[in-house]
Image (tube, rainbow, N blue to C red):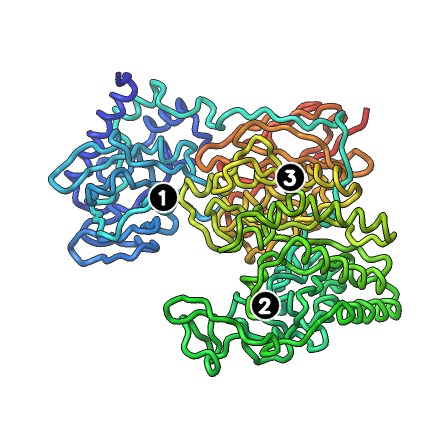
């Protein structure tokens, strides 16, 4: 049954629509709900303000057979705006339209428009307001309640401003977009208008139609528990990776506050340290030998210059690039191929059939353990002359169980349990002899499949999991750890110090700047971080069971080779430039600190000024003056939909906490209790919700002797810098 408030809203919406349809002029106005003062969003205050504000009877037309004066079209969907006709949009791939007017002012009660779309699209449309800066407005699905009239092929829509702008924020643009995947048929829009607040709508809101009586969002009780055991946070969890092609261009990577950098990736398996910046780009780029313009010496020197530690991948594939120009599948020798680049093919015939590789010597020279030992000795000799260590971690190659794919021109056969162990021992022993104090990591495997099975286990045409069954039916990593423990017992030579594994969500959230940003994918992207640590989270992919990677590795290490540290050698969650990607990154850094791992290396590094960039800065330099997450982990709790990560300095008098609101639409009113931390002395708050420029100072909320209250905007990161007086 429809309650009185909903009936009043629907009646008010009809009045708004009538006003919009009867007026044909354009008036330049618009600001937020009520009197346009950008207040707290209190429903009663809004209604009172609306009654005081001059009532507007003429709608502000944004588009009516063409753009109105001073309005701009800055959408991203393929579109046509024919003169004297409705706007035409193709909204496939979550396309959208933005109507923008700088320095918008005024007072409105609703957004109205009409649209025409194929019936097969279903309920696909959403609307929101937007503005420059950190404000995040609710996304409003165009549901039947908001469709106030059907006129032939046209559907008339009225959205009360109380839904679009419950907090009464200033805005300067209107966004209409597809909230799900739709076809490429045209969608038509016309008579887009901002309209006055009718008396009926004001009455409905005064009767209780507002979203919150306080306008501050849902309550979120949080606790920072200084009485619970904590631990020292490894500074190496804030790691990134080399992008060889852009290393000298992207100086922003050094403003992230990253503490360590990894030389790695597929091409590193065939890096020839004697040829400057030369490696083979593998199947990433036509199996070509290339010079990236950055040598390992450049890499190490750059890290030293910027105060960062170095993790160096050492090839144990057995082959490295012989020059700067050769290719694994040259067209001159293998003929026309499915894809080609400057005479190099992708190793597939035109019909997609894999071509049989030629000799590895087409591109490469042999690189036995002695070749790698010589490299390590060379580094150490230069270190001794300099008086400092250059490499803090050596990594034994990169994703060896994918060699038969990534490097199939020189290693077409899938690797087995035994082959991985032999190479690990042979190359690891050479490294240990050349640098007895080395920290050695491995096996740098890519993901779930190769935590459990070898490449031979999953290769096409092989007896399913025969390799694993031949090795006591043990997961690959478990068997690997047991064998290295036994090797150390027998020989006294420790090969492995750090268990290094890679983590990429398999639930189709993208990698790097790629990845869909529809609401469902955004939510799944953020949830996927739970695969690192949460035993209750069932992976939303073909894995279809809890991954809980870090706890799983801790158990396997404790049972099979105690004393090994953990590194996440590669990871990211896609959509760097979207707030969901930034929140996933901030969540991951907090969980790395919580789980007390040794190191983690983002692949490769976030784009400048992106939300993922500011996620790093939340922990490493939130104020541009060195403000950072402190060195000691303090347990903290937060309700679902939010996260809280806390730290303190060695004196215990300074605390830094990072609160995340993972809800894209609704603010949270955080009530943060400081349990056993001391009496709260000072509070500094900085916030970020996607605005250019990053974190900005916020007005602190209320505080008591042992608590602080603060509003967390939707999709936001909030830093609390607190000082306390010890009891």
The residue lying at 46 percent from left, 42 percent from top is: 522
**Quadrant in the rendering for residue 370:** bottom right
Viewer-side residue, 674 vs 247: 247
The quadrant of the rendering that contains the N terminus is top left
Q: Secondary structure at mark 3?
A: helix
Mark closest to the chain's N terminus, 1 or 3: 1
| Left or right, 318 with reference to 116 | right
Q: Secondary structure at mark 2?
A: loop
Assess whether mark 3 and mark 2 are in contact (beta carbons under 8 angstroms). no
- In the displayed structure, does residue 232 sit left or right of residue 345? right
Q: Is residue 516 left or right of residue 25?
A: right
Write down the quadrant of residue 265 in the picture. Answer: bottom right
The residue that mark 3 highlights is: 591
Q: Position of residue 529 (x, y in %)?
A: 56, 41
Residue drawn at 71 percent across, 64 percent down: 314
Check disc 2 and report the residue beneath it: 246
* 382 relative to 593, above or below: below
Is residue 44 visible to us here? Answer: yes
Residue 270 x %, y %: 64, 69
**Dot 1 lies on which element?**
loop
* Crowd around label 2: few <14 · some 14–19 · many ≥20 (10 Å): few
**Cβ atoms at labels 2 and 1 below 8 Å apart:** no
Along the line of sight, which residue is nearer the eye, 684 or 417?
417
Work out whether residue 256 can be spotted: no
In the picture of the structure, the residue carrying the numbered disc 1 is: 105
Q: Residue furthest left?
A: 152
């Amino acid at each position: 049954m429809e309650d009185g408030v909903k009936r009043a809203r629907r009646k008010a919406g009809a009045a708004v629509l009538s006003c919009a349809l009867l007026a044909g002029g354009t008036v330049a106005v618009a600001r937020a709900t009520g009197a346009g003062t950008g207040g707290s969003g209190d429903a009663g205050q809004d209604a009172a303000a609306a009654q005081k504000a001059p009532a507007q009877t003429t709608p502000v037309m944004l588009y009516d057979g063409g753009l109105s004066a001073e309005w701009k079209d800055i959408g991203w969907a393929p579109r046509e705006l024919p003169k004297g006709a409705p706007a035409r949009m193709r909204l496939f791939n979550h396309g959208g339209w933005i109507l923008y007017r700088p320095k918008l002012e005024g007072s409105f009660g609703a957004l109205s428009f009409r649209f025409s779309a194929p019936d097969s699209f279903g309920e696909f449309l959403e609307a929101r307001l937007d503005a420059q800066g950190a404000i995040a407005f609710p996304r409003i699905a165009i549901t039947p309640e908001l469709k106030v009239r059907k006129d032939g092929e046209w559907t008339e829509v009225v959205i009360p401003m109380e839904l679009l702008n419950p907090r009464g924020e200033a805005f300067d643009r209107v966004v209409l977009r597809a909230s799900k995947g739709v076809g490429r048929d045209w969608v038509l829009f016309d008579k887009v208008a901002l309209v006055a607040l009718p008396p009926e709508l004001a009455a409905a809101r005064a009767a209780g139609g507002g979203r919150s009586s306080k306008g501050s969002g849902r309550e979120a009780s949080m606790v920072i528990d200084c009485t619970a055991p904590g631990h020292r946070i490894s500074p190496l969890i804030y790691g990134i990776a080399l992008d060889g092609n852009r290393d000298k261009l992207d100086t922003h990577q050094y403003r992230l506050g990253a503490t360590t950098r990894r030389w790695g990736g597929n091409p590193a398996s065939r890096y020839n340290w004697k040829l400057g910046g030369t490696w083979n780009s593998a199947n990433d780029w036509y199996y070509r030998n290339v010079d990236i313009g950055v040598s390992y010496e450049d890499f190490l020197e750059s890290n030293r210059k910027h105060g960062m530690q170095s993790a160096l991948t050492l090839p144990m594939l057995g082959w490295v690039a012989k020059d700067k120009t050769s290719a694994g599948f040259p067209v001159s020798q293998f003929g026309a191929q499915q894809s080609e680049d400057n005479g190099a093919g992708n190793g597939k015939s035109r019909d997609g059939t894999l071509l049989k590789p030629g000799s590895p010597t087409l591109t490469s020279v042999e690189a036995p353990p002695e070749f790698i030992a010589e490299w390590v000795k060379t580094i150490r000799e230069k270190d001794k002359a300099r008086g400092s260590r250059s490499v803090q971690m050596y990594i034994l190659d990169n994703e060896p169980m994918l060699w038969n794919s990534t490097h199939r021109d020189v290693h077409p056969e899938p690797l087995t349990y035994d082959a991985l162990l032999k190479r690990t021992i042979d190359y690891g022993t050479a490294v240990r002899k050349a640098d007895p104090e080395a920290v050695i990591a491995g096996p740098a495997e890519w993901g779930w499949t190769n935590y459990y099975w070898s490449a031979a286990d999953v290769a096409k045409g092989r007896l399913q999991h025969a390799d694993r069954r031949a090795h006591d039916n043990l997961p690959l990593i478990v068997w690997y750890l047991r064998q290295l423990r036994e090797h150390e017992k027998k020989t006294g030579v420790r090969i492995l110090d750090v268990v290094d594994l890679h983590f990429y969500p398999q639930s189709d959230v993208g990698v790097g700047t790629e990845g869909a940003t529809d609401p469902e994918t955004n939510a799944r992207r953020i949830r996927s971080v739970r695969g690192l640590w949460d035993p209750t989270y069932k992976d939303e992919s073909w894995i279809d069971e809890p991954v809980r990677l870090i706890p799983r590795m801790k158990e396997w290490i404790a049972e099979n080779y105690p004393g090994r540290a953990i590194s996440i050698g590669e990871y990211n969650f896609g959509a760097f430039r979207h707030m969901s990607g930034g929140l996933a990154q901030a969540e991951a850094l907090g969980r790395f600190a919580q789980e007390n791992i040794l190191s983690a290396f983002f692949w490769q590094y976030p784009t400048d000024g992106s939300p993922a960039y500011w996620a790093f800065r939340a922990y490493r330099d939130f104020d541009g003056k060195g403000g950072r997450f402190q060195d000691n982990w303090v347990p903290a709790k937060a309700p679902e939909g939010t996260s809280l990560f806390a730290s303190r300095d060695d004196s215990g008098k300074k605390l830094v906490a990072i609160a995340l609101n993972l809800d894209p639409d609704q603010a949270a009113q955080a009530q943060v209790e400081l349990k056993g931390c001391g009496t709260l002395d000072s509070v500094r708050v900085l916030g970020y919700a996607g605005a250019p420029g990053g974190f900005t100072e916020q007005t602190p909320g209320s505080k008591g002797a042992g608590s602080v209250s603060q509003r967390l905007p939707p999709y936001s990161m909030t830093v609390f810098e607190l000082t306390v007086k010890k009891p």
